[in-house]
Structures are given as structure tokens and as C-alpha cells.
Image (tube, rainbow, N blue to C red):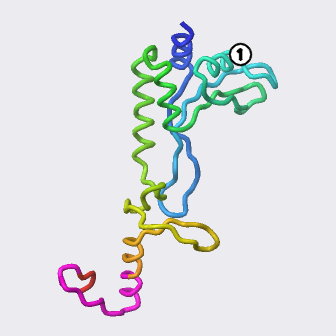
Amino acid sequence: MQRAWAAGFLDGEGCFGLARAGRRKRGPDWYRVRASASQHGEIGVAADVLVKVQRIIGLGRIELHGAPDDYKWVVEGADRIEQVLAVVGPWLGPIKVAQAREALARFRSQRRLKGDADRCVRGHTYSGLALRGGRLRHICAQCARLRDRAERAAMGTPPRPFKNVARRYTE
């Protein structure tokens, strides 16, 4: 019964969407996926309904939003949004479920500019680790070869001889 109530509250007062996370050095802006619901309470005290939603769903934080009596319950991150949908999804209306699915799809379709634990930015598997600049860093041999080729081409150095001429990177 509590989950159905929380779903009804999110259906009426909640929002699933993207929030600007900031500018990136290379590429387009980055967006975070979030679920939120705002409500007015007393000054300095969060609204009881937001505390109840947080307790029922078991996720999120309550933060001050705008005016001194305006509070917002917020959950960020794709995994946590999926958890919210798992808890209240069966009782959410089709419009809210579609809004959540669209926000997740748009978040996941963003171009990633960093690699992860196993792959570099270009998607290559890391070839090892090395100490560089006082830090342990992942090394991608394929990306290093591509950088070396581009640097040689920029300096006007003729390409290295290839056994297979079709693999040459310049004319």
C-alpha cells in the first residue's frame, strides 16, 4: 500500500529527467539523470511527504530548493533510477514510466569521454599499467600507436614501411 501511495505521489508531483552536470573540456555538455519531487514545508523543516517518500523508496536525499520553505527529494544516477522504478514502477502511470525510460535512454546515449576500468576512450582494451606523473595509469597500446602516427604525419615524417601497403595512413 505504501509503494502505491509513493507511486501516486511521484505520478502527480514527481519528475524524471536530465540535469546539466557541467561543461567538459572536450565535447558536448554532460547531463545527469535524476528523479525528483518538490514540496513546500515549514522554514527549515522538510515536508513530511518527502520524508515519507524517501523512507518508502529507501533512496535519495532531501535538499533545499529555492525558497526557504521549498524542499526537493532527489535521486541521481541510472542505477538508482532503475531501483526507484523497481520499487514503485508497477503503480506508476504510463506517462511517468515513459518519462523515466526516455530520460534513461537519453542519459545512456551521451558520448562518453572517459574510459572505464577495462577500456579506453576509444573502446580499446587496456594493455597494461604504468607509473606516469606519480600516478598509476592504464596504458592503451593501440591509442599510443595512433598518437605516434598522427605526430609523425604532422611533422611531415614519411610513414614507416609496411609489409601490407593498404595499411598506410598517408599517401
In the rendered image, the vertical position of residue 59 relative to residue 165, given as above or below? above
The magenta segment is 149-167
Residue 112 sits inside the magenta stretch: no
Task: Residue at the far right: name it.
Answer: 44
Q: Which residue is mark 1?
A: 48
In the rendered image, the vertical position of residue 21 relative to residue 133, given as above or below? above
State the quadrant of the N terminus. top right
Q: Amino acid at mark 1?
A: Asp
Relative side of 138 to 40, left or right: left
Residue 132: x and y in percent read 58, 73
In the rendered image, the vertical position of residue 143 relative to residue 51, given as above or below? below
Residue at disc 1, secondary structure: helix
Q: Please report the residue visible at 60 percent of the width from the left and 17 percent of the height from the top.
A: 56
Which quadrant holds residue 119?
bottom left
Which one is nearer the viewer's eye here, 113 or 103? 113
Residue 159: x and y in percent read 30, 89
* Label 1 environment density (alpha carbons within 10 Å; few <14, some 14–19, many ≥20): few
State the quadrant of the C terminus. bottom left
Which quadrant holds residue 2?
top right
Residue 28: x and y in percent read 48, 56
